[in-house]
Amino acid sequence: MLYRYLITGLFLLSFAACSSKKNADLIVHNAVVYTADSAFTTAQAFAVKDGKFLAVGSSEGILDGYESDSVTDLRGQPVYPGFYDPHAHFLGLGQMLDQADLVGTASFDEVIQRLKAFHAKNPTAIWLIGRGWDQNDWPDKQFPTKEKLDAAFPNIPVCLTRIDGHAVMLNSKALRLAGVTRNTSVPGGEIMLANNEPTGVLIDNAMGLARRVMPQPDAEDKERMLLAAQRVCLSLGLTTVSDAGLDRKDIELIEQLHKDNKLKIRDYVMVSLGEPNLDYYLKRGPFQTDRLTVRSFKLYADGALGSRGACLRKPYTDRPETGGFLLLNPKELERALTLLAQSEFQANTHCIGDSANHLILDLYGKLLKKPNERRWRIEHAQVVSPDDFWKFNRYSVIPSVQPTHATSDMYWAADRLGPVRVKGAYAFQDLMKQNGLIAFGSDFPVEAPNPLYGFHAAVARVDAKGFPAGGFQMENAVDRASALKAMTSWAAYANFEDHLRGSIEPGKQADFVVLQQDIMKIPAPEIRGATVLQTWIEGEKLFQK
């Protein structure tokens, strides 16, 4: 009888121990979990409940304390918070997937060849549209002219956007439709001429002349494009992307696709500057749903360095007759920033040249006056004068940079800027020191959307070919822990989303990514080739390799 009682008691104790475990929807264990929290701790396991991290710790502790019908043994594979891209063009990526891909073309002749192949597959297109050319990759490094386009495509208008999105190339038919002549001028833009005739190249604000006559995708087209872009981004471990400048109609489309559960990737949308958008969103105020954050406006101070539209304090070294230009004059910029200062919105201003950065940092300082929690951002912060870095700290300005811009531009940046001024370009370490953080994006589709390319560029300062030996301006490389934070927890902070996600901590949304290789440990040349195995958003697996 006593033996029976002992057995019964042990059974009850065992049952009580089992039943004391907390229920979870998912348990992940036997992993290397980089939490990206404030202490940059690592763990082995976590439990997820209702789309949030319930507990994070050792495998033994999680398995002893929690139970679930879904338990995953990762066998030592690395786990990171879901990757962020805080400065990109998500809809733009979807649109580019619908166009002729001109990225990596080695000559204008190759551009023509790719266009012919694309046109053969899309013979009913009203316009021939492509994106991705970069004259800096061609032997003569000169802007193209329209003659070869005219010969190849005399009867269909052609519009080809440069890789950086700050210049287009048109054929003669497109120029006629756009009404561009030798006498056309546009403030904040340039119509390039040769022999007093348009060459076909329109820079910055002048691009609007073409875009106003081009066919525009409708809501159904854009839905298809967004879903295509989502598939690409999820396969790369991205759980939060961004749209650096959208109008109300596109923002509302994204919001509706989230509500319909068609679009699951998170999107931080910057509202495009413009009177209708200012009027509507300043009245509505910032808002945040489970998958969408709208609390910033995108401003453009200048153009791009590659097309010499970046505004410099002194002329270009390789074209001393110009110093670039502003896309809005200082009074217009100050008026818009003053309106934002009186609201709760962030100001996120595109600044490439040292003159643009100098102007905007001073305008931010005039309005913000001292350290603050406004989280205003400089997008790109590409060329900064030595006497301007301190202003990022003084006014709590977040540098939102794109590491792959450095490794794309390094071949010709010194030609544009000269050997002294280039030292203030792509200065990620110097920028990070100001406030102890920095945000890393890609600006896709200007660059590839793979966040690991940016991680590699930031820490190794070389491109996919391993050029240059020893790295480009290595004094501004960042360590791997900082690079990971810059695309997770610090990026979330830059988006006003750090209370929701960006790190693997109890209470935060369960966005995470599993890689095959550990980017914190593998040799730098292997980082770009690391494989994404799984991408999870809010405890739901949305990509499996």
Image (cartoon, rainbow, N blue to C red):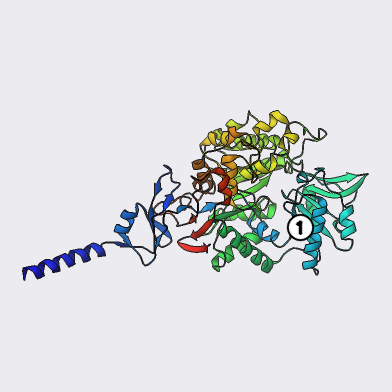
Quadrant of the image for the N terminus?
Answer: bottom left
In the shown orientation, is residue 442 left or right of residue 42? Answer: right
Q: Residue at x 93, y 44 (%)?
A: 196
Q: Amino acid at mark 1?
A: Gly
Q: Is residue 421 above or below residue 53?
A: above
Residue 14: give x, y in percent of width and height: 21, 64
Q: Is residue 386 above or below residue 515?
A: above
Residue 212 visible within the image: no
Mark 1, Cα crowd under 10 Å, few <14 / some 14-19 / many 20+, is many
- Residue extending furthest toward the left: 1
Residue 234 visible within the image: yes
The residue beneath circle 1 is 130
501 and 121: which one is in front? 121
219 and 159: which one is in front? 159
Q: Residue at x 64, y 46 (%)?
A: 464
Residue 112: give x, y in percent of width and height: 82, 56
**Count of numbered labels shown in the rendering:** 1
In the shown orientation, is residue 2 left or right of residue 151? Answer: left
